[in-house]
């Protein structure tokens, strides 16, 4: 999950200038994804509708990296007493991090993501927030811890821990496994209001590349968060689902043909 500040086009332009100045010693790429849903930690961000997503990524030789990532979203119309409804329909993320390795098999990653939500915003509702992360990877296994001091601009802290594995099978197919846990003051506050609680999410699926295109199908379940089961119009639904995605990364290389 990752997002934008202020304007999507302005952010892309700024990153493009940085990338152009460092092109001789860095890699610039862009990934386009079409998915059956935008799933974020077991919770749909598009009301179980398809998602169209794109990224612009810059990676330096030192391990420093930066990126922009965007997707359509559907949060319904939110407001509250005395507040006009707001219809948010785009998410954009700013990403800045540093990755390296201790040994050939053991790597690390740390950074920050700023989540920005755009749409018919009346200024009364603001969900934008910052999240910090750190992670370790060992061969086919990786894990990460995410922390936000102001999750969803709620004034409450939140944590997310995850463990992932990609296990090679036959015919170049990979088994994809994921387990995550959301907890912290934000989720405790929802529990006190009987609107949610700390919860687990998990996923299991298969992935394979065909030429320049990557395919993935997964079974995802976040329904441990019972308050998001059976939500109206599937807004923020955490019910189990089958997820499918196809993506490709530019620039294409001859090796991918």
Image (cartoon, grey):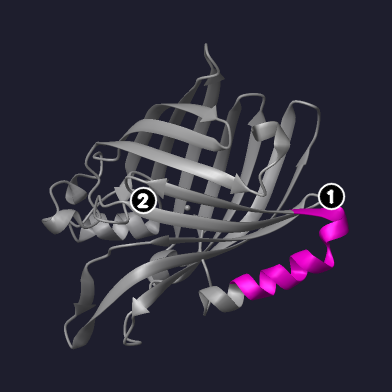
The tag earlier along the polypeptide, 1 or 2, is 2
**Residue stretch rendered in magenta on the structure:** 12-27
Q: Residue 98, relative to residue 213: is it above or below? A: below
Q: In the rendered image, which quarter contains the C terminus? A: top right
Residue that appears at 47% across and 53% down: 1
Other residues around mark 1 within 10 Å, as few (<14) / some (14–19) / many (≥20): few
Left or right side of 5 for 220: left
Residue 125 is one of the magenta-drawn residues: no
Q: How many marks?
A: 2
Q: Which secondary structure type mostly characterizes the magenta part of the structure?
A: helix
* Whole-percent x, y for residue 187 in the image: 33, 55
| Mark 1 lies on residue | 61
| Mark 2 lies on residue | 38
Q: Quadrant of residue 68?
A: bottom right
* Whole-percent x, y for residue 41 in the image: 38, 46
Q: Tell me the distance, in whole angstroms, between the alpha carbons under discs 1 and 2.
A: 31 Å
Q: Are marks 1 and 2 in contact (CB under 8 Å)?
A: no
Q: Secondary structure at mark 1?
A: loop
Residue that appears at 58% across and 37% down: 212
Q: Quadrant of residue 22?
A: bottom right
Residue 20 is one of the magenta-drawn residues: yes
Specify whether residue 155 is in view: no
Q: Residue 70, relative to residue 159: is it above or below? A: below
Left or right side of 80 for 178: right
């Amino acid at each position: 999950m990752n997002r934008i500040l202020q304007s999507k086009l302005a952010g892309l332009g700024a990153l493009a200038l940085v990338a152009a100045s460092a092109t001789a010693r860095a890699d610039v790429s862009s990934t386009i994804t079409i998915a059956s849903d935008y799933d974020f930690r077991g919770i749909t961000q598009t009301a179980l509708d398809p998602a169209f997503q794109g990224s612009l990524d810059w990676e330096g030789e030192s391990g420093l990296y930066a990126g922009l990532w965007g997707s359509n979203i559907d949060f319904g119309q939110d407001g509250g007493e005395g507040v006009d409804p707001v219809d948010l329909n785009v998410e954009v993320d700013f990403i800045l991090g540093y990755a390296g390795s201790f040994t050939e098999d053991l790597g690390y990653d740390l950074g920050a993501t700023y989540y920005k939500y755009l749409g018919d915003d009346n200024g009364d509702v603001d969900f934008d927030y910052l999240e910090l992360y750190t992670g370790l990877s060992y061969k086919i296994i990786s894990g990460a811890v995410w922390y936000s001091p102001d999750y969803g601009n709620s004034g409450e802290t939140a944590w997310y821990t995850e463990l992932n594995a990609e296990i090679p099978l036959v015919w170049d197919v990979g088994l994809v496994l994921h387990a995550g846990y959301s907890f912290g003051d934000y989720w405790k506050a929802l529990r006190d209001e009987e609107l949610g609680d700390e919860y687990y999410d998990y996923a299991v699926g298969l992935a394979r590349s065909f030429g320049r295109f990557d395919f993935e199908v997964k079974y995802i379940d976040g329904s441990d968060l019972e308050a998001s089961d059976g939500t109206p119009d599937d807004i923020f639904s955490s019910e189990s689902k089958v997820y499918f995605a196809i993506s490709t990364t530019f620039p294409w290389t001859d090796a991918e043909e």
